Amino acid sequence: MQVCLFDIDGTLINTGGAGSAAIGQAFGQVFGVDNLDGVHTVGRTDRGIAAELFSVHGVEDSTDNWQRFRAVYLEHLQENLQQREGRVLAGVVELLEHLVGHDDVAVGLLTGNVAEGARIKLEYYCLMQHFAFGGYGDEHPGRDDVARETLRVAQSHLGRTIAGHEVCVIGDTPHDVRCARAIGARAVAVSSGFCSAEELSAAEPDVLVESLADPAVLRAIFA
Ligand SMILES: [Mg+2]
């Protein structure tokens, strides 16, 4: 069994900045602050980004504030996807179609997006049908905890224990590589997203490619 866990932004799609725009608009609407400057969003979980925004702007980091923020973010996300010019990244559709055609491969999401945000983005780009399960950024500020939860979800979905060596995490930031290591998984890093090949190389992924069209991705998944 091979379990492939995909990041979304910068790995499968580029939304043209729709996600961070929606985050900024929601924060402005709910808390009256309209400035994301200095807050890093790349590779972070939505809950982690919100926690930092709360801290920077003196907003109480409560469940209530998080849920209000998330609800308004999701309202803004769909319209931002329509307004911006995004795209599915090279090789993604071919790779996913290849993987889901294998009986001994399970394909899931390991993303910092909140679950509903992931669904909205991937349905907009007609990719959601490829993913049978996932771990999301609704609860955990740290991506390593999302990885641990995703492994539990995958085991529940498949009805069996999964060893780390059966898992391959595919993502575009050093955070993705690190969270793969947190569950003992292999890491494929792709520089089609938000980080340079040099930044990714420093995180020491098992494989580093320029796009998911590179045959080295399949070799890493089935290693
Ligand atoms: Mg990403």
Image (cartoon, rainbow, N blue to C red):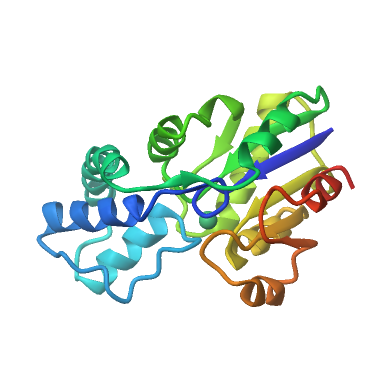
Check the image and name the residue furthest to the right: 223
- Quadrant where the N terminus sits is top right
Tell me where residue 10 appears, x and y as whole percent.
52, 55
The answer to which of 58 and 179 lies nearer the viewer is 179
For image coordinates 82% across by 53% down, the residue present is 216
196 over 127 or under it: above or below: below
Residue at image x 14%, y 65%? Answer: 33
203 sits to left or right of 130: right
Left/right placement of residue 151 relative to residue 167 reads left
Which picture quadrant has residue 153? top right
For this orientation, the residue located farthest to the left is 32
Q: Position of residue 100 (x, y in %)?
A: 71, 27
**Residue shown at the point (70%, 48%) measured from the top left:** 213
Tally of numbered tags:
0
- Residue beneath the point at 71% across and 73% down: 201
Q: Is residue 56 visible?
A: yes
Q: Position of residue 171 (x, y in %)?
A: 62, 55
Relative depth, front residue between 57 and 5:
5
Q: Which x, y percent locates residue 112?
A: 48, 51
Location of residue 163 (image quadrant): top right
Left or right, 169 with reference to 115: right
Residue 62 visible at all = no
Residue 49's quadrant in the figure?
A: bottom left
